[in-house]
Image (cartoon, rainbow, N blue to C red):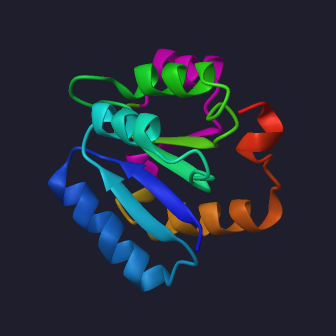
Amino acid sequence: MDTLYIVEDDDIDRMSYQRSAQSALLSFDLVFFKTGIELMDHVHNAASDDKGPVAIVLDFNLPGMSGLDCIKALKENIGTRHWPIWVVSTSAAPQDIAEVYRYGATGFISKYDTGNNFELVFSLLEQYAALVTLPQATDMGH
């Protein structure tokens, strides 16, 4: 089964993601990371045959390594640069939105627009995963 990585430091938001996932009957497994550093450690320690996630849902405001720094690191790595990254954040600052796109995010979703009903986010990601064909890491020179 495909996996979806969710990087979220807020306990309440993580619980909301879990509740929404149960309601949405997702076709992929969720793997949670509390910080960007945890995500990057997982990526660096993953087996070479790990195909990676169908997408990453990334909070912009993370302690330690920011969401923007995660995007930069993932997009600089030939094995992960093709991974779709959806930023979900309470920030709606135009400069934050512009920066995540500048560094290669697939999309930016405001938590205020979802009302913390992450079923909308999961619905989008289900449709995205069903319709978009991504290269495998081995096709990217990894």
Res 93 visible: no
Query: In this rendering, is residue 126 above or below 89?
Result: below
Q: Position of residue 123 (x, y in %)?
A: 59, 69
Q: What residue lies at 44% left-to-right and 27% top-to-bottom?
A: 70
Q: Position of residue 95 (x, y in %)?
A: 49, 15
Residue farthest toward the left in the current orientation of the protein: 11
Question: Does residue 101 belong to the magenta stretch?
Answer: yes
Query: In this rendering, is residue 33 above or below 93?
Result: below
Q: Position of residue 90 (x, y in %)?
A: 34, 39
Question: Does residue 38 belong to the magenta stretch?
Answer: no
Q: What residue lies at 78% left-to-right and 34% top-to-bottom?
A: 140
User: Is 44 or 12 nearer to us in this picture?
Assistant: 44
Residues shaded magenta:
92-113
In the picture, the quarter occupied by the N terminus is bottom right
Q: What residue lies at 20% left-to-right and 48% top-to-bottom?
A: 10
Where is residue 132, by image quadrant? bottom right
Res 15 visible: yes
User: Is 131 or 43 nearer to us in this picture?
Assistant: 43
Q: Position of residue 21 (x, y in %)?
A: 42, 75
Apparent side of residue 54 relative to residue 87 in the rendered image (left or right): right
Disc tally is 0
Q: What residue lies at 62% left-to-right and 56% top-to-bottom?
A: 54
User: Is 79 or 119 nearer to us in this picture?
Assistant: 79
Residue farthest toward the front in the current orientation of the protein: 48
In the picture, the quarter occupied by the C terminus is top right
Where is residue 58, by image quadrant? top left
Apparent side of residue 112 relative to residue 2 in the rendered image (left or right): left
